[in-house]
Amino acid sequence: MVLKAFRIQMYKCILDSGWIEVTPLTVLVGKNESGKTTLLKALHKLNPFNPEPYSIEREWPRGRRRERDNAQVVCTARFELSEEEIQELAKLTHQKIAENTIEVTRDYAGSLDVLFPSGLFPDKIHQSDIGATAPSTQKKVHEYILKQIPTFIYMSDYHIFSGTTQLDQVWQRKEQNQLTEEDRTLLTIMEIAKLNLEDEVRKGNLSDREERQYDLDDASATLTRAISNRWKQRCYEVQFRADGQLFYTFVKDERDPSLIRLEERSRGFQWFFSFDLMFMNESSGTFKNCVVLLDEPGLHLHPDAQKDLLKRMEDYTRENTLIYTTHLPFMIDLEKPERICVLSETDNGTIVTDNLAQSQPEAKSVLQAALGMSGSSSHLVAQRNLVVEGLDDFWIITEISRLMRSAGKDSLPDDLFITPAGGDSEAVYIAAFMIGQKLDVVVLLNSNSTGRNGKGELVEKWLARYRSNRARVLSLDECLDMKDKGLSIEDIFPEKFYIEKVQEVYKKQLASAGCERLELVGDGPICRRVERSLGKYGIGFNRGSVAKAVHSDLSRMHNANELPSKTIEMARKLIAGINAAMPQEA
């Protein structure tokens, strides 16, 4: 079973988070105190590694005492069944299983409910119903599903292990129940290496140093093997040394083969090493098919190390689902928008959305910083720049160019830096700044009224003011030879392709409204037609959500030959127009 979505209700500051879609690596973005930790903790308690029940006394939303109810569902999780699991369910039920998803809930009372596909059983099997009198098939299926639910592992403390300590002093603090966080981290390392603190303290008072070192070498090999078997992407070698009660840890990896004391390594190295070992300890070495929840990882790492951690986390997702929270721009990869969910505080509690453009200012500033937009100096990242109106344009143009390049067709230059703005007015501001810095810049705007106004302002005010010949302003209509159509980037796709993505995003809402096939209304750009069509059913159109679905589809393609023929031709014109407008080398 793989976690695909979850929903939190009536838990602390969250009245109803709404459904949160989950990818193998998902990031929850929000300012401090926005509810990121609350969200992870509520999800963690669905099926934690160590039992941790909900507490209605401490965790029920404040100011709503009269509504308290132990039957209130806190977490609902939607899981995708594997082919093997579907086959096993078919054997147990003697029925063909048509659906590949189920939902599991846990309420304040601690009861787990399993919601099966319609027609297989009653809509819901309650944990308390599975007793001696329950139908044997239902009991077997329920027990089978509970065994398949992934284990949820929550981590929030990332202590750096210094590697050198006085063992007898650690033992004394342990006996007095005064262990420090550093002591606990040391004991974690020793546990993974199969070293016993009491034995090592006793050996520290003996004269047989040779036998002791032999034992430490064996422990070093044990820990090294445990790490190398798991962390193939970064191979550590560990060696323990001891002089009486003084205990040392030496570490090296393939990036730096020098075997030196851990605390003499860089802080980033110490952090990664400690994080990897704590990660192993938290899961007791059980990694496969876990849901790992990381609260603000990399908080004290410098930006380069944060980017390294983000790459490392991708490796963790080979066998697990990983969800993490952050307010750090370098911990976000905006080229993979399907990963990003944004927390916003409302009068009705914290909600979670994938609509990045409509996120609150604090969250939006994090996203902008991730794109190099947080301050004026961050725009000086390239000599050649393309400014587009928004994230939707950024995602689609980036992927289209990659696909064209992979097919051996003309693409955007490798050294071209694409900067998305928060609309046409912000695109004008960013472009004006770049023009003032004498950078090469092409600005691509939509051909609606605001886009035309933005183009006029840039040409008449800023280009004239700076007398620049290193900047150009383009409209999408001009690039695609379709003047006065008011196009947006989505119009490079065939109508059928885009509608399929819309129906994918709004599948449940359309089904609830009784709409089997969305028919577009009126003429004009496809986004406007979709908005009118969804509006007939009382459904609001979120352009960004569909753009993320389009991007996800494009990211799975290998080259442009997999694109619709219309899109290939439109992409050719768009790229040719941008390249022609880009100032040539002086």
Image (cartoon, helix red, strand yellow):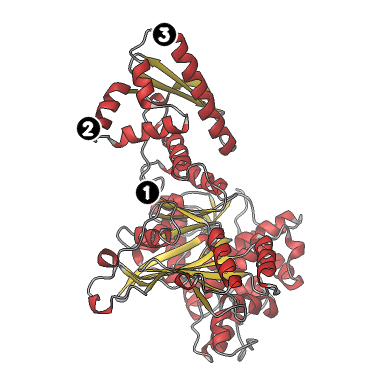
Residue located at (35% from left, 65% from top): 361
Question: Residue, x 63% and y 86% (percent of image)?
Answer: 518
Q: Residue furthest top?
A: 207
- Picture quadrant where residue 66 is located: bottom left
| 301 vs 239, nearest the viewer | 239
Q: Is residue 41 visible?
A: yes
Q: Residue beneath label 1, please?
A: 156
Q: CA distance from mark 3 to mark 1?
A: 41 Å
Q: Report x, y in % for residue 87.
A: 70, 65
Contact? badges 3 and 1 (CB < 8 Å) = no
Name the residue at 35% across, 45% down: 157
The residue at which mark 2 appears reads as 176
Q: CA distance from mark 3 to mark 2?
A: 29 Å
Residue 262 is drawn in which quadrant? Answer: top left
Which mark sits nearer the N-terminus, 3 or 1?
1
Q: Which mark is residue 208?
A: 3
Point out the image quarter for the N terminus: bottom right
Q: Secondary structure at mark 1?
A: loop
Asked which quadrant contains residue 504, the reply is bottom right
Would residue 10 appear left or right of 280 to someone viewing this image?
A: left
Q: Position of residue 308 (x, y in %)?
A: 50, 42
The earlier-in-sequence mark between 3 and 2 is 2
- Three-letter residue code for mark 1: Ser
